[in-house]
């Protein structure tokens, strides 16, 4: 399945509480098939590329640099982080919320124009629009924010 992995604020029951604002371990949420369109899962699966990281697998130096930039709160880096977070929120909104809207529209369209639906019953035009929105957001993330 597809997991959404996010940081979370520490609570009084967490060992980090009072020491750190956030928890050491992230929250894992498995996205259900009702939350994530099947065509999107297939498109994502078909677009994955396996890359051998070589020496890049040693992420210690990268984590050190990222931690330093986060702690020092450089203006450019902090602004870039805020943009990246907003792009992620926008991406999740498009994937999750637009899919819910599309399910309602697909049910209405299925009876009216079956020729516009693919073999799985999904409306191809709407799927293409959704993929374009996702592509636009990920392109902005790739070209920016830092």
Image (cartoon, helix red, strand yellow):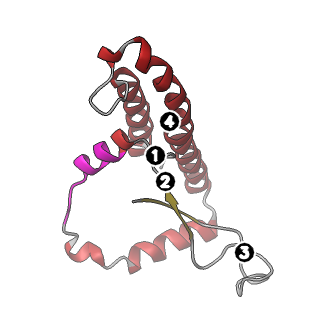
Q: Secondary structure at mark 4?
A: helix
> Circle 2 sits in a helix, a strand or a loop, which is it?
loop
Tell me, yes or no, whether the highlighted magenta stretch contains residue 115: no
Whether 43 is among the magenta residues is yes
Whether the residues at callouts 1 and 4 have beta carbons within 8 Å, the answer is yes
Q: Which residue is mark 1?
A: 36
Front one among 115 and 75: 115
Q: Earlier in the sequence, mark 1 or mark 3?
A: 3
Whether pointer 4 and pointer 3 mark residues with C-beta atoms closer than 8 Å, the reply is no
Question: Is 68 above or below relative to 128?
Answer: below
Image x and y of residue 129, in percent:
40, 25
Spatial distance from mark 4 to mark 3, Cα to Cα?
31 Å
Q: Quadrant of residue 104?
A: top right
Q: Decide which of 20, 76 is in the foreground and name it.
A: 20
What range of the chain is rendered magenta? 41-51
The answer to whether the residue labelled 1 contacts the one labelled 3, judged by CB atoms less than 8 Å apart, is: no
Determine whether label 2 and label 1 are within 8 Å by CB: yes
Q: Residue 46 in the image: x percent, y percent?
A: 23, 47
Q: Residues within 10 Å of mark 4 (few under 14, many from 20)?
A: many
Q: Residue at x 53, y 48 (%)?
A: 88
- Judging by the rendered image, the residue that carries numbered circle 4 is 99
**Residue annotated with mark 3:** 10
Considering the image in quadrants, where does the N terminus appear? bottom left
Q: Which residue is mark 2?
A: 32
């Amino acid at each position: 399945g597809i997991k959404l992995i996010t940081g979370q604020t520490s609570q009084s029951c967490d060992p980090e509480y009072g020491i750190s604002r956030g928890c050491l371990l992230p929250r894992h949420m498995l996205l259900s098939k009702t939350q994530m369109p099947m065509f999107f899962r297939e498109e994502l699966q078909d677009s994955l590329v396996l890359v051998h990281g070589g020496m890049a697998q040693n992420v210690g130096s990268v984590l050190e640099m990222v931690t330093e930039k986060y702690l020092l709160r450089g203006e450019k880096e902090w602004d870039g982080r805020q943009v990246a977070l907003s792009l992620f929120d926008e991406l999740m909104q498009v994937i999750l919320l637009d899919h819910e809207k599309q399910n309602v529209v697909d049910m209405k369209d299925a009876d009216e124009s079956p020729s516009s639906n693919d073999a799985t019953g999904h409306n191809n035009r709407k799927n293409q629009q959704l993929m374009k929105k996702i592509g636009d957001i990920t392109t902005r993330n790739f070209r920016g924010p830092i």
